[in-house]
Image (cartoon, rainbow, N blue to C red):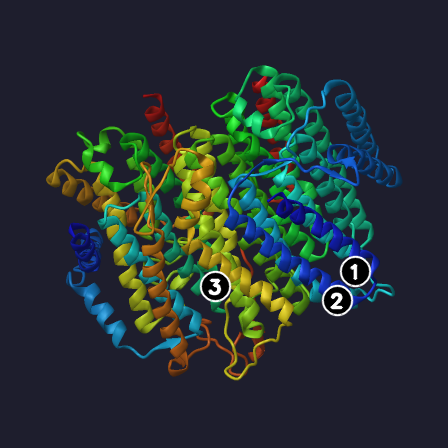
């Protein structure tokens, strides 16, 4: 059993080494594909076997694995310190040194080295492993043709792909390690590995702006690492154990423990890019698109929400819990608002990611079975839909040379396949009966129990999100010439896109069964009863399968009606009767000349300007975090 | 079985009743403007005529979007008559709103583009208000399901009067009435031609008209839930509310989206929040 766990962690690491040292394109491609395939199978195998009780890992070559992790930990901190020194960042150096000092004290003085089962897999871990291994692998597969084109575009003399795939694949292993850890020190180690991988990937293109943003990501996440160490020490000083399973059984035991948990939540906040830490994730947009997809959907930020969610059962019903919920809800509202003012497709996705993570953290804070179910559903479906959308933007960018949604107007006319998949991706992010909305529905129903501020923030945020997603999807629709050819996509581009878009729809349909087999056992008391493919609770009912059937039939009829449009008279759009005779998208202007028509979205700059709102939101968020941390005391 | 019958009644009855209300609306509006007005059945004649017209579109997306709008509106009404979950009904009707906007955006026409942007702003204004109203339902009945309303002894209006006012605010937007009709230009030729509907014509405009009737019944149904204990009072409440909407429609000038967003968020949500605080405090 534990072999499978070790495989999930070590195989990516081994494949990463192969990618790095064997400088052959074919080998690299084979290694990435094989790793993706095996990881997917291993994750599904783990799912089939069910949960794993905490297990010992044993030793490698006679060296105890705990000791090995401790050594690697200090080595990693040394490397991070080195990069902080090289980029002359005092923040990174300071945060790293503090971690080293505290960690030495912790390991040598505080911890009495009991033997702690290092790995375990409950349902939460299983879902995360699935997300990491399946979605993450698909992104790595997508990166193979993408990076080839990317480097061709940059005219690199020497390929940097070995390094790129080293960190991409290693990232998957680190994430699997993080979510499967039962020893909090192991969790901390993998937490730091993800920080380091993201730093190297953000700075991959080695331009000035890439380096600057990578350094910012590193110092913010080093702060998170420091918070993790402090939290870990405080929790240990109270609980006296490194065993997470034992911690979860313990429950809240006073102010010091809660403060420790608050620090762990803060670490989660930095990693999940919650306001005021959102700037590192937005800066990460300079990296090649597969990196963004990986960071936003299956790794990095999901590590942040995972940490909060992992410890959520311990602080249920405390003020800290309310604080976490308010912070999450505020991020949901603020980032939804910031997204309205954006026209850069990747930035829109980034803000929507941070907003959705806020919603997940808010659910973790509400901390009822209903809310925790919502959080798990959101993690799962957000990963699928968001990775799909990022990969779509990457494909579009390589096709039209822009990531601005204004330039994507009428994309269906030239790139129908990509446009269709993108529209599907956007719809699965915001409309019923798809999974993300199912999660949002649960979140709002759960929030009605908790706190009026949270309800209002969720209500506003959810409306704001519809605005920027709907207008993006709509503007990609457009006319297409009758005999126009569809664009061609390489197999390794189309495979991940098709898999993810199918997955987002099919898994949504299966959500009642996913709930029954995976979510309900973790949440404990079951908030829902499943009947007729519907999720029924005391709060309300979401008729998943019936809605799928009815809306699906309706959509099929609509598609059939629309596909007969060649029999319908195609007219030029209305231009007050002054349509140009020669061009379909122009009207007759002065001197009988053609004036092409153009239009743009309303970005509501006066209300939702990023530069104006960000400082205000940051200040408010800092206040809320202080409130959350202080309330734990 | 009973649910199924109710759903069928809803699906068949809603557009008939909605069309009738649209006809009455035109009569009362004409009366307010000292005109004669068309026969009450006029909306049905109009739609029948639309269905008989030649099919013309800018592109196929409009056909798709018009149909999905109708389907979503009908499903939302069906869920309402099946005593379903209020929040889910709201999200299903939002599908219609989103597809209407996307269809308008797919056409390269200045009028439909501007109309679509404005329609999005209207959704931005009324959606949070509606969610707060539904949370109010939850606070009173302990469930988001309509079924739970019938177990209440006294009308909800007694416990959530301010939320009812907030709902009326949202209703004015949803019914596309002045001062909030800037996405569709309810009255004749104004600066926006027909906004979000500009590029829909013939049978497809007919579909949208029918979908709008469904939506009218849905929002009036929501209002009706506020006095579920007595059918006579319920009817009176709806009639008074709708007459008030017509009066507002005819006495107010159309406003800009800035005016709307500020008013609706401040007053509409303000009313909602105050009322919710009462309910929380209980």
User: Does B240 sit above or below residue B1?
Assistant: above
The answer to which of A482 and A251 lies nearer the viewer is A251
What percent of the width, then of the height, locates residue B261? 45, 43
- Where's the C terminus of chain A, which quadrant? top right
Tell me: residue B20, above or below residue A296: below
What is the C-alpha distance between the residues marked 1 and 3?
40 Å
Image side of residue A24 versus residue B93, left or right: right
Q: Position of residue A369 (x, y in %)?
A: 43, 34
Foreground tag (2 vs 3): 2
Q: Are marks 1 and 2 in contact (CB under 8 Å)?
A: yes
Alpha carbons under labels 2 and 3: distance apart: 35 Å
**Tags 2 and 3 touching, CB below 8 Å:** no
Dots 1 and 3: beta carbons under 8 Å? no
Q: Nearer the viewer, mark 1 or mark 3?
A: 1
Residue plotted at (79% across, 21% down):
A108
Whether residue A343 is visible: no
């Amino acid at each position: 059993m534990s072999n499978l766990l070790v495989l999930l962690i070590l195989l990516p690491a081994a494949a990463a080494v192969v990618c790095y040292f064997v400088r052959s394109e074919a080998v690299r491609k084979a290694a990435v594909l094989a790793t993706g395939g095996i990881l997917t199978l291993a994750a599904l195998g783990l799912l089939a076997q069910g949960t794993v009780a905490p297990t010992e890992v044993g030793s490698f070559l006679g060296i105890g694995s705990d000791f090995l992790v401790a050594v690697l930990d200090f080595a990693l901190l040394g490397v991070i310190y080195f990069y902080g020194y090289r980029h002359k960042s005092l923040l990174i150096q300071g945060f790293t040194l503090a971690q080293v000092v505290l960690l030495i004290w912790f390991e040598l003085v505080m911890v009495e080295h009991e033997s702690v089962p290092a790995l375990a897999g409950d349902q939460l871990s299983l879902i995360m492993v699935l997300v990491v291994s399946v979605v993450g692998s698909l992104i790595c597969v997508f990166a193979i043709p993408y990076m080839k084109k990317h480097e061709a575009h940059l005219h690199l003399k020497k390929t940097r792909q070995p390094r790129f795939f080293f960190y991409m694949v290693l990232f998957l292993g680190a994430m699997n390690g993080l979510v499967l850890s039962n020893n909090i020190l192991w969790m901390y180690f993998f937490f730091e590995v993800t920080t380091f991988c993201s730093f190297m990937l953000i700075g991959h293109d080695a331009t000035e702006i890439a380096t600057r943003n990578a350094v910012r990501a590193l110092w913010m996440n080093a702060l998170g690492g420091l918070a993790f160490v402090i939290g870990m020490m405080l929790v240990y000083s109270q609980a006296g154990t490194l065993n997470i399973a034992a911690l979860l059984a313990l429950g809240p035991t006073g102010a010091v423990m809660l403060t420790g948990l608050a620090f762990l939540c803060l670490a989660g906040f930095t990693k999940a890019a919650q306001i005021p830490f959102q700037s590192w994730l937005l800066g990460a947009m300079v990296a090649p698109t597969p990196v963004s997809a990986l960071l936003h959907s299956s790794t990095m930020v999901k590590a942040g929400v995972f940490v909060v969610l992992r410890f959520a059962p311990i602080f249920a019903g405390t003020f800290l819990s309310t604080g976490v919920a308010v912070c999450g809800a505020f991020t949901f509202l603020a980032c939804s608002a910031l997204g309205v003012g954006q026209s850069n497709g990747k930035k829109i996705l980034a803000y929507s990611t941070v907003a959705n993570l806020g919603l997940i953290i808010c659910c973790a804070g509400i901390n009822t079975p209903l809310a925790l179910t919502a959080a798990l559903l959101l993690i799962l479906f957000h990963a699928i839909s968001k990775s799909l959308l990022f990969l779509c933007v990457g494909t579009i960018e390589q096709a039209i040379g822009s990531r601005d949604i204004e330039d994507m107007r009428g994309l269906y006319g030239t790139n129908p396949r990509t446009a269709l998949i993108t529209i599907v991706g956007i719809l699965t992010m915001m409309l019923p009966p798809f999974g993300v909305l199912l999660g949002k529905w649960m979140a709002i129903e759960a929030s009605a129990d908790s706190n009026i501020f949270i309800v209002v923030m969720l209500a506003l945020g959810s409306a704001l999100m519809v605005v920027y997603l709907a207008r993006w999807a709509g503007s990609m629709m457009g006319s297409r010439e009758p005999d126009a050819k569809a664009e061609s996509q390489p197999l390794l581009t189309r495979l991940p896109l098709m898999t993810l878009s199918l997955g987002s729809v099919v898994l949504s349909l299966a959500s009642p069964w996913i709930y029954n087999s995976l979510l309900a056992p973790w949440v404990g008391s079951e908030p829902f009863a499943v009947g007729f493919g519907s999720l029924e609770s005391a709060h309300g009912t979401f008729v998943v399968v019936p809605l799928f059937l009815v809306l699906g039939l309706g959509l099929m009829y609509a598609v059939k009606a629309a596909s007969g449009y060649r029999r319908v008279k195609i007219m030029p759009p209305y231009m007050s009767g002054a349509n140009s005779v020669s061009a379909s998208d122009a009207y007759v202007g002065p001197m009988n000349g053609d004036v092409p028509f153009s239009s743009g979205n309303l970005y509501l700059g006066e209300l939702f300007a990023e530069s104006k709102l960000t400082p205000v939101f940051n200040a408010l968020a800092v206040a809320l975090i202080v409130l959350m941390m202080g309330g734990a005391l | 079985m009973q649910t199924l019958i109710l759903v069928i009644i809803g699906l068949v009855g809603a557009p008939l009743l909605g069309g009738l209300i649209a006809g009455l609306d035109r009569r009362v509006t004409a009366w307010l403007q000292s005109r004669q007005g068309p026969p009450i059945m006029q909306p049905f004649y109009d739609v029948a005529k639309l269905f008989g017209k030649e099919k013309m579109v800018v592109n196929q997306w409009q056909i798709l979007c018009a149909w999905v709008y109708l389907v979503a509106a009908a499903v939302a009404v069906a869920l309402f008559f099946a005593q379903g979950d209020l929040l889910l009904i709201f999200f299903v009707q939002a599908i219609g709103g989103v597809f209407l906007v996307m269809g308008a955006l797919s056409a390269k026409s200045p009028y439909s583009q501007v109309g679509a942007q404005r329609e999005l702003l209207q959704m931005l204004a009324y959606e949070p208000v509606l969610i707060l109203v539904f949370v109010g339902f939850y606070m009173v009945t302990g469930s988001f399901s309509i079924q739970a309303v019938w177990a209440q002894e006294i009308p909800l209006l007694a416990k959530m009067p301010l939320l009812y006012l907030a709902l009326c605010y949202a209703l004015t937007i949803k019914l596309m009435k002045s001062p909030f009709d800037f996405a569709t230009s309810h009255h004749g030729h104004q600066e926006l031609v027909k906004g979000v509907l500009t590029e829909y014509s013939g049978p497809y405009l007919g579909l949208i008209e029918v979908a709008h009737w469904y939506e009218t019944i849905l929002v009036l149904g929501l209002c009706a839930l506020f006095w579920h204990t007595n059918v006579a009072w319920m009817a009176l409440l709806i009639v008074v509310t709708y007459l008030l909407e017509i009066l507002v429609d005819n006495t107010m000038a159309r406003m800009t989206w800035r005016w709307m967003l500020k008013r609706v968020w401040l007053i509409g949500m303000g009313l909602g929040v105050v009322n919710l605080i009462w309910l929380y405090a209980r």
